[in-house]
Image (cartoon, helix red, strand yellow):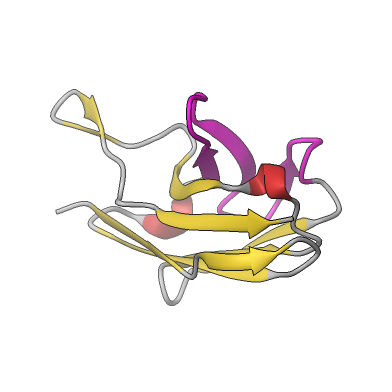
């Protein structure tokens, strides 16, 4: 059974840091590229950062230099270190494979973790 459990979100002041974690199960984690996505109110979900099974990383320009994605294949866990947070980073953050997992012909998403950055 596929499961993605995100944690580590919270309320932080602008300029602060948070570290998100995502525990994955039910699929072969180590061979899959994994991404962190976010969805702000009224906006579409967007892919922020991705890491390949071998550890290569990519970031969108808006988070480049501030966010760092990493993974621990032994723990089936992916992390997102977020520094220099801005109010516009406020969103629900999700992890998923890249592209996202499909279960029974529908995309699977975990519950996400809320990140709120106050100005």
Kindly indicate the quadrant of the structure image that contains residue 102: top left
Which residue is the extreme one toward the front? 119
- Rendering coords of residue 113 (x, y %): 42, 57
For residue 35, say whether it is visible: no
Please give the name of the residue rendered at 77% of the width and 64% of the height, measured from the top-left corner.
Answer: 83
Q: Is residue 52 magenta?
A: yes
Measured as percent of width and height from the top left, residue 15 is found at 81, 64
Q: Which quadrant: the C terminus?
A: bottom right
Taking the image as shown, residue 110 lies to the left or right of residue 12, namely left
**Residue at x 30%, y 51% (from the top left corner):** 111
* Image point (48%, 25%), residue name: 42
Q: Position of residue 60 (x, y in %)?
A: 74, 36
Q: How many marks?
A: 0
Q: Nearer the viewer, residue 84 or 28?
A: 84
Residue 107 lies left or right of residue 112; in this view the side is left
Where, by quadrant of the figure, is residue 85 drawn?
Answer: bottom right
Q: Position of residue 40 (x, y in %)?
A: 52, 36
Is residue 91 a member of the stretch shown in magenta? no
Image height check: is 45 above or below 77? above
**What range is drawn magenta here?**
35-63
Residue at 54% x, 57% y: name it: 115
Q: Residue furthest right?
A: 65
Q: Is residue 15 left or right of residue 8?
A: right
Instruction: Judge whether residue 60 can be spotted in this image.
Output: yes
101 shown above or below 17:
above
Q: Quadrant of the N terminus?
A: bottom left
Drawn side of residue 53 relative to residue 30, left or right: right
């Amino acid at each position: 059974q596929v499961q993605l459990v995100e944690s580590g979100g919270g309320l932080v002041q602008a300029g602060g840091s948070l570290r998100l974690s995502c525990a994955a199960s039910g699929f072969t984690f180590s061979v899959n590229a994994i991404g962190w996505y976010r969805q702000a109110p009224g906006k579409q979900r967007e892919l922020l950062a991705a890491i390949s099974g071998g550890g290569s990383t990519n970031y969108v320009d808006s988070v480049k230099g501030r966010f760092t994605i990493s993974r621990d294949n032994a723990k089936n866990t992916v992390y997102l270190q977020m520094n220099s947070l801005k109010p516009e980073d406020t969103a629900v953050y999700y992890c998923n494979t890249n592209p996202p997992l499909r279960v029974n012909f529908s995309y699977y998403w975990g519950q996400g973790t809320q990140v709120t950055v106050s100005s």
